Image: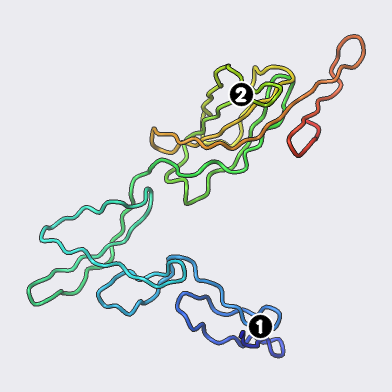
Amino acid sequence: MREACCVHWHQTCAEPSEQCKLPGRCVEGECVYDDAPDGTACDDGDEATYFDTCEATMCAGVEPVVTPDKEFTFTGLEPFTTYAFQVAARTFQGQGPVSEAERAKTLAGTPSGPPQDVVGSARSSTSLRVTWREPLYGERRGVITKYTLRVQQLDDGRQPTEDEPLVLDTPDAGRSFNVTGLELYTFYKVRACVRACVRACVCFCVLKEGLCRREEMGRRGDWLRSMCHEPSLAHLC
């Protein structure tokens, strides 16, 4: 059972009983202990491990690597991530004190996640405006340098046509782009992929379909307005 708290408007939550829990907070008169974020310092009680942190609410340390050489290469690390390390000398009698912690950052890698909130909308009778947000922070794996858009024309049944898709690179890391030179009254499928400071590019299908219809006004054929039709939304362009 949760303990009572907030007596006379004062918080009276006890200290959390687990290391990987945050200090208690009052919610409707009861104490609630949220999970501590991954990476929160803790003590797993094992003197043989180092850099003890909370991971998925569990406290765990890192087993040391023993080598007879004066260098060691760690593999299988995450790209574009800072790691801390310490070194200690050993003899047949045991291990001496460890050095101060040093830090180093791995190089950038290929982004592991797609751009977020990709939206396509009609800009004119022959162009679409595509906007998006950066991939999630932990999925960027580097400094974003540009994005690539793949624009595929669809038929009336919203199936890809035999036409080759347009592949367009943005000039920088901006989060919007105008796709021009498109066909009137036509569905298009837009895919966005992200590039970091490496040449590889991983594409993820983030689909947004838009159909624009122009309505004529008068005999001169002047355009009155433009309507966009999306799977769940109809709005003025």
Q: Please give the label number shown on residue 236.
A: none
Disc nearer the start of the sequence (2/1): 1
Where does residue 171 sit, x and y in percent of width and height? 52, 28
Quick one: label 2, few (<14), some, or many (20+) residues within 10 Å?
some
Image quadrant where one finds the C terminus: top right
Where does residue 16 sit, x and y in percent of width and height? 51, 82
Q: Please give the label number shown on residue 160.
A: 2
Residue type beneath disc 2: Pro
Residue at 55 percent of width and 29 percent of height: 149
Label 2's element?
loop
Label 1's element?
strand
Which residue is more in the foreground, 84 or 16? 16
Kindly indicate the quadrant of the structure image that contains residue 232: top right
Which residue is more in the foreground, 3 or 101? 3
Q: Please give the label number shown on residue 30.
A: 1
| Looking at the image, residue 105 lies above or below residue 166 | below
The residue sitting at the top extreme is 220
Residue at 66 percent of width and 18 percent of height: 182
Residue at 40 percent of width and 34 percent of height: 200
Give the colour scheme of this rendering: rainbow
Image quadrant where one finds the N terminus: bottom right
